[in-house]
Image (cartoon, grey):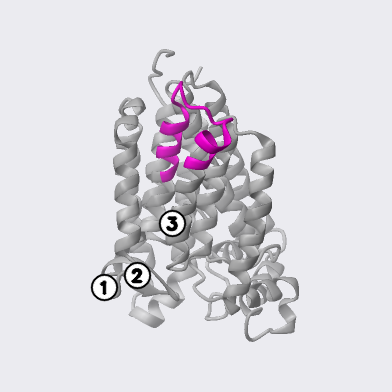
Amino acid sequence: MSKTRTAPDFWLLASILGLLAIGIVMVYSAGSVLGFHDYGDSFYFVKRQLLFAVLGLIAMFFTMNFDYRLLRNYAKLALIICFGLLVIVLIPGIGDVRGGARSWLGISSFGIQPSEFMKLGMILFLSYLLSKEDYKITHFTKGLLPPLGCIGAAFGLIMLQPDLGTGTVMLGASLFIVFTAGARIKHLAGLAAIGVVGFIGLILAAPYRLQRITAFLDPWSDPLGAGYQIIQSLYAIGPGGLAGLGLGMSRQKYSYVPEPQTDFIFSILSEELGFIGGLLVLLLFLILIWRGMRIAMTVDDTFGSLLAVGIVGMVGVQVVINIGVVIGMMPVTGITLPLISYGGSSLTLILTALGILLNLSRYAR
């Protein structure tokens, strides 16, 4: 193990704090109208975002300032707790239904999403399991199927809520770890074919998912229904031009883009800050992913390397899907933009995970 650094990776830390700062400003700008209309307070959403940002930064400070190898000891326990929460949230009367999914535990407007914590729990467990020296990931039945079975069970519980977006991010980050650990391409290719068939089945099983696919291909075929969100998002991005309409000057946040402070916050950002503002956010995410992958390649032990791959994969998959949806390149999935969108569970979770990545950077060569 290489000597611990006196400070975490500067560029990684700077990109995280830069994105967080932009996110807080944009949550206020995008959510001020809705906050005043629904709660009589223009600062309603940003005050709550600041609260969770502080909690997340405290968690990030903690997770980047201890020996990350100790996480091995809690990997199984973390996964068991996450599975338990996923089961509990499905119980009527305990789990809250919001946005059509029974995915929340909490009181009133305060709550947590167990599926968000499963993303990190699964990353931690897979990194622990697949980093064992005697684990043979190249063996199909004894090596590959056990972790895939665990991933599939978690994905199935998340889909019972249902929450396809969060399940997809968890699945994508997990498969990055499995691939990096050395799984055979032919095994993964065969399972991918089965997965595509299953994914199509999930879409066909729920009419609203099929409507989203149809709307993605031609949103103007149903401009007031399934295609409404994508059309309004594009109406926001287009007028933004190069430099934007100016901070706080969005027109689409006036009840045109639904929930502008969450899933579609990037469209409001592009409308107010233009191509330049959108490009700045993308560059910060690219810096974060670049430094994260560099850490994954230079950490001395396999556990740390897989942990870094999983965290970077989680952020990367979420960013690609969210922005893909906002610009009309993907179907609407209900995924937030990390560090930018409003959301307590997602913000706290992502800062906690990035704290682990910063911790790993202290041990990178």
Residue 247 at x, y = what percent? 55, 63
Q: Are marks 2 and 1 in contact (CB under 8 Å)?
A: no
Q: Secondary structure at mark 1?
A: loop
Lower position in the chain sequence, tag 3 or tag 2: 3
Q: Nearer the viewer, residue 278 or 176?
A: 176
Q: Amino acid at mark 2?
A: Tyr
What residue is shown with label 3? Answer: 24
Q: Residue at x 43, y 27 (%)?
A: 360
What residue is shown with label 1? Answer: 108
User: Nearer the observer, disc 3 or disc 1?
Assistant: 1
Q: Amino acid at mark 1?
A: Ser
| Range covered by the magenta-colored residues | 122-146
Q: CA distance from mark 3 to mark 2?
A: 12 Å
Is 27 placed above or below 134 here? below
Q: Secondary structure at mark 3?
A: helix
Q: CA distance from mark 3 to mark 1?
A: 23 Å
Q: Amino acid at mark 3?
A: Ile
Q: Residue at x 48, y 67 (%)?
A: 261
Q: Residue at x 61, y 41 (%)?
A: 286
Res 88 → quadrant = bottom left
Q: Residue at x 58, y 71 (%)?
A: 250
Res 160 → quadrant = bottom left
Lower position in the chain sequence, tag 2 or tag 1: 2
Residue 132 at x, y = what percent? 44, 25
Magenta residues, dominant SS class: helix
Q: CA distance from mark 2 to mark 1?
A: 15 Å
Q: Tell me if residue 244 can be seen.
A: no
Q: Secondary structure at mark 2?
A: helix
Q: Nearer the viewer, residue 45 or 105?
A: 105
Residue 183 at x, y = what percent? 60, 33
What residue is shown with label 2? Answer: 44
